[in-house]
Image (cartoon, rainbow, N blue to C red):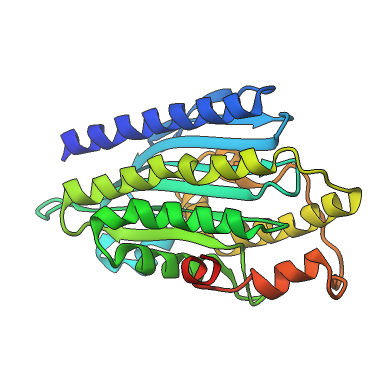
């Protein structure tokens, strides 16, 4: 198992390097700053954050590899068999908050988890995915996003895209708002079948596929003009991102309960955000169209093709 752990770790470190390099290249103004950190209870990571760029107001790409002798309560509550296990968790997680409201916010994560106990076989699985949160959606962009997701899933089986697309719609759903966080993408967890090699290959496909899905959208929207009113709407909708991450996100909860680095865990928060009491978009406006047409699960590939 140790050889497999090292294999996954080297992929994740290289993925972080490639994503940061390409995001900095397209931004063309700012560079990522790195913090190397150690976790007191075991492990550590490297956090990279780009701020005040030409395109990206803030972009964070975090690698972490943490381990310990006791599972966090959030994990054992869902998986009682993990009680009393030593664990290792590693992954790359990123969130991009563009300045231009016409460029969507986006998130991606790929991860590997191992739990071990004396006298028992190791318990391991992969997880991850990516999702898109537009403020002024364009059908061309949404279709490209989901076509890229479907294409990378196809070699692994016809059921991968529909299953993990539907899981994404369920996971990134704000129950108290009765709306999705955006237009979805892929989400998978507990993946260990049909075996390590195939599960790892799928995790790699998702990690490598993120920029294929996202960068063409950034390139198409980077020069779109926007008004101050549209900027204010973007800041308002960023509040939904905060609400989801602090109320529902498993990774945030696991990280905080396992004694992870708080600054790295919360780097997904937008640099500027606002709330407005009982906001209602004007009827017939682009803002109303977001609520009416996009913040619900849809069969994007068939409806938009």
Can the viewer see residue 71 in this picture? no
Residue 51, by quadrant, is top right
Residue 60, by quadrant, is top right
Q: Residue visible at 36% across and 69% down? A: 163
Residue 39's place in the image compared with 33, above or below, is: below
Q: Residue visible at 28% across and 37% down? A: 8
Q: Residue visible at 35% across and 59% down? A: 189
Q: Position of residue 98 (x, y in %)?
A: 69, 41
The quarter of the picture where the N terminus appears is: top left
Judging depth in this view, the residue of 52 and 91 nearest the camera is: 52
Q: Residue visible at 60% across and 38% down? A: 263
Query: In the orientation shown, which residue stands out farthest toward the left?
Result: 119
Residue 206's place in the image compared with 4, above or below, is: below
Q: Position of residue 272 (x, y in %)?
A: 78, 45
Judging depth in this view, the residue of 132 and 256 nearest the camera is: 132
Query: In the orientation shown, which residue stands out farthest toward the right?
Result: 228
Q: Position of residue 278 (x, y in %)?
A: 85, 73
On screen, residue 19 versus residue 4, left or right, reads right
Q: How many marks?
A: 0
Can the viewer see residue 208 in this picture? yes
On screen, residue 121 versus residue 250, left or right, reads left
Q: Position of residue 29 (x, y in %)?
A: 69, 22
């Amino acid at each position: 198992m140790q050889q497999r752990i090292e294999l996954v770790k080297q992929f994740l470190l290289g993925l972080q390097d490639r994503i940061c390099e390409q995001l900095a290249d397209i931004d063309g103004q700012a560079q990522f700053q790195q913090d190397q950190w150690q976790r007191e209870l075991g492990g550590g990571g490297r956090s990279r954050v780009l701020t005040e760029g030409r395109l990206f107001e803030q972009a964070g790409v975090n690698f972490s590899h943490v381990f310990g002798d006791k599972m966090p309560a959030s994990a054992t509550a869902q998986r009682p068999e993990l009680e009393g296990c030593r664990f290792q968790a590693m992954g790359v997680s990123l969130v991009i908050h563009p300045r231009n409201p016409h460029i969507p916010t986006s998130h991606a994560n790929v991860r590997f988890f191992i739990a071990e106990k004396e006298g028992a076989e190791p318990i391991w699985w992969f997880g991850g995915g990516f999702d898109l949160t537009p403020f002024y959606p364009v059908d061309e962009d949404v279709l490209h996003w989901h076509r890229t997701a479907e294409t990378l899933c196809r070699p692994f089986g016809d059921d991968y895209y529909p299953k993990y697309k539907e899981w994404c719609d369920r996971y990134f759903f704000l129950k108290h708002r009765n709306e999705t966080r955006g237009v979805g993408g892929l989400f998978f967890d507990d993946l260990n079948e049909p075996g390590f090699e195939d599960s790892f290959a799928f995790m790699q496909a998702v990690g490598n596929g993120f920029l294929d899905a996202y960068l063409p959208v950034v390139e198409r929207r980077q020069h779109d003009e926007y008004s101050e009113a549209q900027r204010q709407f973007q800041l308002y909708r960023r509040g939904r991102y905060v609400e989801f991450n602090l109320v529902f996100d498993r990774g945030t909860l696991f990280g905080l309960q396992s004694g992870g680095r708080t600054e790295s865990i919360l780097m997904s928060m937008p640099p500027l955000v606002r709330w407005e009491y009982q906001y209602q978009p004007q009827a017939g406006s682009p803002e109303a169209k977001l609520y009416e047409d996009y913040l619900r699960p849809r069969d994007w590939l068939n409806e938009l093709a």
